[in-house]
């Protein structure tokens, strides 16, 4: 990792994020989610030891949504719970920067490079990674540190692989995305 000031951004790793009663492979999806959470926990442990700022993003779903605030699915997974000094940015759209203070929190920490991990690859991860680059951040996306559920046309593994491929090298001006396994991301 470069000598740029880095921050770890963990997006939407909430208890109910992948709960969808129509999923045919629910057990496989949830096992993969649990494994992804363990890799994110390892990133968090390394970042905290290196005193790298950690910022969480938490999705607020509307009434009846699986991520409606103060419902069982809304909390961040306990295994990766934020520390008291780590901010939690609440959002209502796929873009973690849209109508939130994420950019200001990152500026206050002098972040120039973001390590991103989390949930909903094709929505919140993709959108937030692309937006971060367009806002002037370099991004390291943990290739095995994000996940999603199956869709009617693609399995979650295909969605993750596709986004890892299309995001690696994505750029805006002098800023770009690099995709690396979480074990290769050092702080």
Image: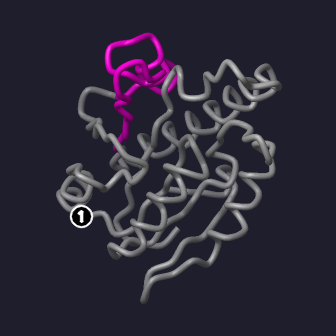
* In the displayed structure image, the side of residue 2 where residue 103 appears, left or right: left
Tell me which residue sits at (68%, 50%) in the image. Answer: 183
Q: Position of residue 86 (x, y in %)?
A: 29, 36
Vertical relation: 185 (above or below) 152: below
Q: Quadrant of residue 39?
A: top right
Main secondary structure of the magenta stretch: loop
Q: Is residue 47 magenta?
A: no
Vertical relation: 181 (above or below) 69: below
Give the magenta part as a residue range.
55-82
Tell me which residue sits at (31%, 56%) in the image. Answer: 97
Q: Position of residue 143 (x, y in %)?
A: 68, 55
Vertical relation: 95 (above or below) 65: below
Tell me which residue sits at (39%, 12%) in the image. Answer: 71
Q: Secondary structure at mark 1?
A: loop
Vertical relation: 65 (above or below) 148: above
Q: How is the image coloured?
A: one colour
Q: Is residue 58 magenta?
A: yes
Outermost residue toward the bottom in this view = 173
Q: Residues within 10 Å of mark 1 (few under 14, many from 20)?
A: some
Q: Position of residue 19 (x, y in %)?
A: 61, 22
Q: How many marks?
A: 1
Q: Quadrant of residue 118?
A: top right
Which of the pair 21/81 is nearer the observer? 21
Tell me which residue sits at (26%, 26%) in the image. Answer: 84
Outermost residue toward the top in this view = 72
Q: Quadrant of residue 60?
A: top left
Q: Position of residue 131 (x, y in %)?
A: 40, 66
Instruction: Give the labeled residue for mark 1.
Output: 110
């Amino acid at each position: 990792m470069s000598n740029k000031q880095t921050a770890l951004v963990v997006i939407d790793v909430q208890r109910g994020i992948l709960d969808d009663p129509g999923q045919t492979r629910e057990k496989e999806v949830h096992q993969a989610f649990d494994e992804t959470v363990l890799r994110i926990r390892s990133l968090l442990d390394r970042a905290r030891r290196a005193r790298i700022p950690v910022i969480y993003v938490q999705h607020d779903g509307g009434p009846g949504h699986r991520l409606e605030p103060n419902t069982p699915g809304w909390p961040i997974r306990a295994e990766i719970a934020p520390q008291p000094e780590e901010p939690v940015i609440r959002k209502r759209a796929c873009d973690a920067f849209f109508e939130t203070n994420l950019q200001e929190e990152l500026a206050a920490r002098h972040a120039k490079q973001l390590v991103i991990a989390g949930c909903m690859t094709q929505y919140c991860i993709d959108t937030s990674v692309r937006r971060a680059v367009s806002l002037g951040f370099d991004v390291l996306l943990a290739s095995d540190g994000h996940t999603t559920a199956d869709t009617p046309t693609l399995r979650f593994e295909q969605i993750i692989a596709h986004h890892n491929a299309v995001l690696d090298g994505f750029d805006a001006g002098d800023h770009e995305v690099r995709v690396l396994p979480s074990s290769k991301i050092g702080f």
